[in-house]
Amino acid sequence: MSKNILIEGCVTSVTSAIEAQKGGALRVELCDNIYDGGTTPSYGAVHEARKNLDIALNIMIRPRGGDFCYSDLEFDIMKTDVEMAKELAADGIVFGILNTDGTIDMERSREIIEIAKPLSVTFHRAFDRAINPLDALEDLILLGVKRILTSGQRPSAMEGRELLTELVKRAGDRIIIMPAVDIDETNIRQLIDETGATEYHVFVNKKVPSRMTFRNEKVYMGTDPHLPEYEISITNWEQIRQICQKAQNK
C-alpha cells in the first residue's frame, strides 16, 4: 500500500475480519446488522476477533438502526458497550450521536469519549445526517475525535467527493477524514487523487453457499423474504487485496 494510505475493512463477523486482514487491510471495523447500517457486535464476536487479529480492531457502538438520537436507556447501553470494547482490548470505538436538530450532541459525545480513553475514537456516518457538515467538523475537532467516517453526505463516496475534498482540506492535521461507501478497486485511485484522504473504509463481500443439505424454502427467519437465507456473506479478501494494490498505484 502506498506509504500514507490505510485501508479499513468494514466486517460483520470474525470470519470476515480474518479475511480482511488476509487481503491486506490494516484495520477493521467490526459491527453487526449491516442492513441497518451497523450495530454493536456481540461480546463473543469482539473477544474472538481480538484473539484472531494482528491488525487494529475498532468496534461499532450503536444500540440500534435508524436515527442517531438516543434515549437515556440506549445511551446507557452505549456506555456499557464502550466498557466492553475496552475490556476486550479493542483499539478503538466507532460511534455517533446527534441532537434532534441535526447538530452534534456535544455533551453525550464528550461522555462517550471520556469513557473510551485511551481508545481511538471515530465518529461514524451520523456525520452524514448532520445539518451542517462544516460546523459538525469543527465540533468533532473540539471534542478530540480522531477521525470522521463519511460519504460526504451523499449515497456514496464518489457522489460526495466534492464535500470530502473540502473536509480533508479544512481538517488538515486536526482530524482524519475517512471516505466510505461503495469504494472498491475501480474508484479508490480516483478518490485518493481527488480528495487527498489517507484512510478509506471499504465493504466488499462475496456470497458463500450454506452447508445445509435440507432446505425448507417455505419459511424465512428475517423480516424480508427476498433476502437469501441459505448463503452467507463474508469479506472478499481478494477484492481487498486489489483495493490495496490500487491504493499503491500498482
Image: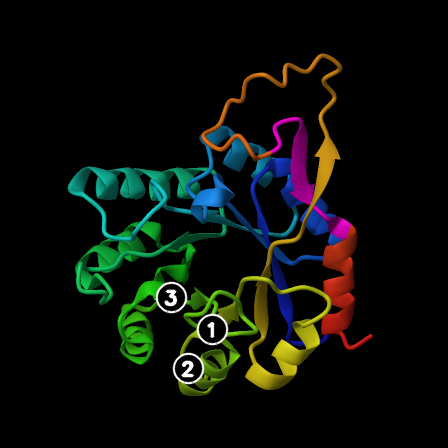
Element assignment for label 3: helix
Residue 249 position in % (x across, y down): 78, 77
Q: Tell me which residue sits at (42%, 67%) in the image.
A: 146
User: Disc 2 vs disc 3: Cβ atoms closer than 8 Å?
Assistant: no
Side of 227 relative to 123 (left or right): right
Dot 1 amino acid type: Ile
Q: Is residue 193 above or below residue 80?
A: below
Question: What label sits on residue 171 in the rendered view?
Answer: 2
Of pointers 2 and 1, the one earlier in the residue sequence = 2
Range covered by the magenta-colored residues: 228-237
Dot 2 amino acid type: Ala
Dot 3 amino acid type: Asp
Q: Which residue is mark 1?
A: 176
Residue 9 position in % (x across, y down): 61, 54
Q: Tell me which residue sits at (34%, 41%) in the image.
A: 64
Q: How is the image coloured?
A: rainbow
Of pointers 1 and 3, the one earlier in the residue sequence = 3
* Foreground disc of the pair 1, 3: 3
Side of 219 relative to 81 (left or right): right
Question: What label sits on residue 61 in the rendered view?
Answer: none
Specify whether residue 115 is painted magenta: no
For the N terminus, the image quarter is bottom right
Q: How many numbered marks does the figure carry?
A: 3
Element assignment for label 1: strand
